[in-house]
Amino acid sequence: MAKSWVNSWADSAAGIGGDLHLDLSDASGSSGPGGRRAALTRALRDAVREGRLAPGTRLPPYRSLAADLGLARNTVADAYAELVAEGWLTARQGSGTRVAERAEPLRRAERAPRRTAGASPRARGPRHDLRQGTPDASAFPRAAWLVSYRRALQQAPNEVFGPGDPAGRVELREALTEYLARARGVRTEPGRIVICSGFAHALRLLFGQDKGGGTGGSTGGGVLRGPLAVEAYGLGFHRELLAAAGVRTVPLPLDEDGARSDLLGRERAVLLTPAHQFPTGGPLHPGRRAAVIDWARARGGAVLEDDYDGEFRYDRKPVGALQGLDPDRVIFIGSVSKSLSPAVRLGWMVLPERYVDDVLAAKGEREAWASVLDQLSLADFIVSGAYDRHVRRMRQRYRRRRDRLVAALATHAPHIEVTGVAAGLHAVLRLPPGTERSTVKAATWQGIALDGLAEFRHPDATESVMPVRDGIVVGYATPSEHAYGAALEALCGVLPPPGE
Ligand SMILES: Cc1ncc(COP(=O)(O)O)c(C=O)c1O
């Protein structure tokens, strides 16, 4: 007998529908209906105790669960009857079998240890992964990538396998020049593009390595210097990376028009996410875009444009790259981390002419980060049109997911405002003041992984710099298709009720 089952629960109490994982592994050694019934009874009891089946949830009819699990109808009926007798379930004429209202899930510490051998709870991960940051890993275009990889390998001249150019393969830089101009409005030429392994690597090259060092290939000094203005809400990992390189970051407040670039002053550089502010959402207002460029020209400052998810826009007109306004002031940085996979580790920096040599020197003679075969594959992937096709397909998929999130909230939590949904792979749910922490806790308790906005707030952003916003960041790209409905249902169940 198979170890576990994932089956569809079309008619749950919240009405969203979803999947429930039932671990029937105890039945593997047992033959006969008695062993199977005991395993199913235990698995259902565990699901109720652990809160995976919430009070009030309607269970599937005997016949459909039996068909899903490959069991006899009577085995399911007997398991339900046993749990009704124990008080975990209730059965009423006309409304089917439901999880009893008083069947309170156990608190985390009280839960029975899982019986699954081997895997630690950490390795198993959360039940519902709504963290922002990663695309749907099940959607990596394996077949199309393989075609590009094979073609790239077949056509590569022998010199490809010799010492590489620190700037990266020219084939990829040429492909990116055309693609970024067409798709993002970037103005550049191959000689001003340096291939790297992603945004984080670009920051390291620009600002120097961790003082602890040892990463290899870098002279460590950095091309730019702080203080660096950053958005008051942003990715903590990037701030930490900068701090480790000895760069002071200064929080720039945000309002409904995006970062307050009009407040830029004596900083030497500024890091922005103009297409889709991370994580709060929303593009940088045209007036603010102009203000950044004015500041950079007046101060001789550098503007770093993090175009982390610029391809994923849904309802609004594409927002072209800020870089197009002044290619001599803006360093445009992108990667395939959202469009393909963060595991591929390929990115690009589009540089003003005067930084190119310093960045190449910082990178060193040996390209230590991006495999030449991956670079050639990506070049082929772009030139053949496969990249555009993949982005288009993923855009549709993420848009559907975004729509399902918005619809679920409109039905089950209409008092919760959802923002930042016009683009990207995540949304922000604004919460009533003072409820963020308890909501994140409730989510954790229900096995939902997500982050509160506080997680992204710059530690120096005092209330006077920028008022605190309560909210949660919901990534809708990570769960696989079959798991998404259950994740939404669980999410709606932990949001604060109206009037709180
Ligand atoms: C704000 C932001 N910038 C950049 C990136 C890309 O980082 P990297 O290219 O290092 O994977 C991410 C994550 O994907 C991000 O969330």
Image (spheres, rainbow, N blue to C red):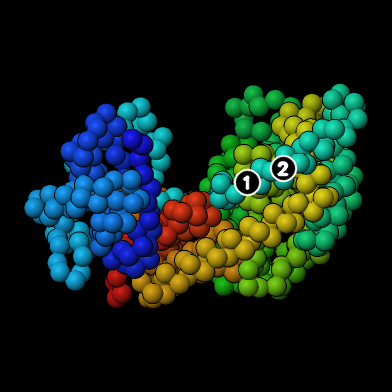
Residue 125, image quadrant: top left
Residue 102 visible to the viewer: yes
The verdict on label 2 being within 8 Å of ligand 1 is no
Q: Quadrant of the N terminus?
A: top left
How far from the left and from the top, in percent, is residue 102?
Answer: 13, 59
Image quadrant in which you'd find residue 430 = bottom left
Q: For the residue carrying disc 1, how many other residues have a C-alpha within 10 Å: few (<14), some (14-19), or many (20+)? A: some
Residue situated in front as seen by the camera: 478 or 472 = 478
| Residue linked to disc 2 | 145
Q: Residue at x 36, y 72 (%)?
A: 413
Pointer 2 with pointer 1, Cβ within 8 A:
yes
Location of mark 1 (residue): 140
- Mark 2 and mark 1 lie on one chain; the one further toward the N terminus is 1
Which of the two residues, 38 or 307, is positioned nearer the viewer here? 38
Task: Note whether 205 is above or below 288 in the view shown.
Answer: above
Q: Residue 348 has which mark?
A: none
* Residue drawn 63% across the image and 46% down it: 140
Residue that protrudes farthest toward the left in the picture: 85
Residue 115 % position (x, y): 27, 33
458, above or below 497, in the image: above
Element class at badge 2: helix
Q: Nearer the viewer, residue 56 or 256?
A: 56
Residue 440 visible, this orientation: no
Tell me the amino acid under the disc marked 2.
Answer: Trp
